[in-house]
């Protein structure tokens, strides 16, 4: 731990660290420094830097009051070369060589706030006023190693069709699995970007969602055909509000195709001469990225499978939709969603985390409910939920009780 009294340390937030990770990894482009005022103004006015697409400027005005106070002091000093440690929650995570100071005039156009992203720190400020430019380095950046592993995998398998999917997976349900499988069928390698969301209220924890995604890919998806990219420390892609950044990140991680849903937030889907077009098409074309717009899918009780409006002949009154908020309401109340909506094993992982030590006499409860061969077995809560769902799906006695 470091002393807060040391004046060579710049404190940053988790969100700011996550954005620095993206820049440092090259996820957003080859420019990997914090911009000076002239560079920031060029991006803000043209949406480009050196002719390359750049929707937001890398103008960094740390939001914490302690950081702004330090920058005010340094700005008025006579020092020409200023090197500071970067600290997150009292731990040094990197350093920065400050080249210049300037007042940030358009914080909404900075990558650290990204227009309609409003992450408020404890002081209630979205961004500071004093911005700094210069090169920085991070002691550890998981995105760098993940990106290197993906490039290695692409080279090993000679993948020419690399498709990216951006998922929130809150929660991971059957449609997500179907989407991944459909994508794998037409790709050599699939990159699954797991997105962190703005608030934890009414949402599943990011680490829990990552565990569920990894479980499904490990057990039910050809794992050599997928790579998971966790955006653990940034909400820049939350709720898909920045589709252009999604396209840029997908391209820079090695994808040449991007799968998006037709209800994708900020997509602006429209039809021109009966051809589906989006506001993202021009950007994707310049990036050399093919967009694949997926139709809305649902479960049809007559088809007994997941279908789309184009592939199902039955009316909407036969369709069961995958409303994530409804699924979460069940889970937060401790109820397992139907197996047709969510894989029981995934529901078990979630309920085990939401309700730890829920049953005082779990072993006896399992012994009373589930068949065994006479050998005393030890059950976990996950075992209990999975076995209980199997009982729910046992329907051979259904007709016998129809008249009761």
Image (spheres, rainbow, N blue to C red):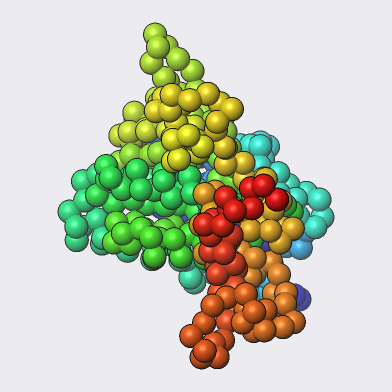
**Residue 273 in view:** yes
Residue drawn 62% across the image and 41% down it: 323
The picture places residue 100, in percent across and down from the top left corner, at 58, 52
Vertical relation: 234 (above or below) 4: above
Q: Is 81 in front, or is 261?
A: 261
> Is 27 in front, or is 71?
27
Looking at the image, residue 118 sits to the left or right of residue 184; the answer is right
Number of numbered callouts drawn: 0
Residue 55 % position (x, y): 51, 35
106 versus 384 height, above or below: above
- Residue at x 41%, y 31% (from the top left corner): 293
Q: Is residue 24 visible?
A: no
Across and down, in percent, residue 226 comes to: 34, 56
Observer-nearest of 371 and 324: 371
**Image quadrant of residue 90?**
bottom right
Which residue is situated farthest in the top direction here?
Answer: 273
> Measured from the top left, where is residue 116 in percent x and y?
66, 37
């Amino acid at each position: 731990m470091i002393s807060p009294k040391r004046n060579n340390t710049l404190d940053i937030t988790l969100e700011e660290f996550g954005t620095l990770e993206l820049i440092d990894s090259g996820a957003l482009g080859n420019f990997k420094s914090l911009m000076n005022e002239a560079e920031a103004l060029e991006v803000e006015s043209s949406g480009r830097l050196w002719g390359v697409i750049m929707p937001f400027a890398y103008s960094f005005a740390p939001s914490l009051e302690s950081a702004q106070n330090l920058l005010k002091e340094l700005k008025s000093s006579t020092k020409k070369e200023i090197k500071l440690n970067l600290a997150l929650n009292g731990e040094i995570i990197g350093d920065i060589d400050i080249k210049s100071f300037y007042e940030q005039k358009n914080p909404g156009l900075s990558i650290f706030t990204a227009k309609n992203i409003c992450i408020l720190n404890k002081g209630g400020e979205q961004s500071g006023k004093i911005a700094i430019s210069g090169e920085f380095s991070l002691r550890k950046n998981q995105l760098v190693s993940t990106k290197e592993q993906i490039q290695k995998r692409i080279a090993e398998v000679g993948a020419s069709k690399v498709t990216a999917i951006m998922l929130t997976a809150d929660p991971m349900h059957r449609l997500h699995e179907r989407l991944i499988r459909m994508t794998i069928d037409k790709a050599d390698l699939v990159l699954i970007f797991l997105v962190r969301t703005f608030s934890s209220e009414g949402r599943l924890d990011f680490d829990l969602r990552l565990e569920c995604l990894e479980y499904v890919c490990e057990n039910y998806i050809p794992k050599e055909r997928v790579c998971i990219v966790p955006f653990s420390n940034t909400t820049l892609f939350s709720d898909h509000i920045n589709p252009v950044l999604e396209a840029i990140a997908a391209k820079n991680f090695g994808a040449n195709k991007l799968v998006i849903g037709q209800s994708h937030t900020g997509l602006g889907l429209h039809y021109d001469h009966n051809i589906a077009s989006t506001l993202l098409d021009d950007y994707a074309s310049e990036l050399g990225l093919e967009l694949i717009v997926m139709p809305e899918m649902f479960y049809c009780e007559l088809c007994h499978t997941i279908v789309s409006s184009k592939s199902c002949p039955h009316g909407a009154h036969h369709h069961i939709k995958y409303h994530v908020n409804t699924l979460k309401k069940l889970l937060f109340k401790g109820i397992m969603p139907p197996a047709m909506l969510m894989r029981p094993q995934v529901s078990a992982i979630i309920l085990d985390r939401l309700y730890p030590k829920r049953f005082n006499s779990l072993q006896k409860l399992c012994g009373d409910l589930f068949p065994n061969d006479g050998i005393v077995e030890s059950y976990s809560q996950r075992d209990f939920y999975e076995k209980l769902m199997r009982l729910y799906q046992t329907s051979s006695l259904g007709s016998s009780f129809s008249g009761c």
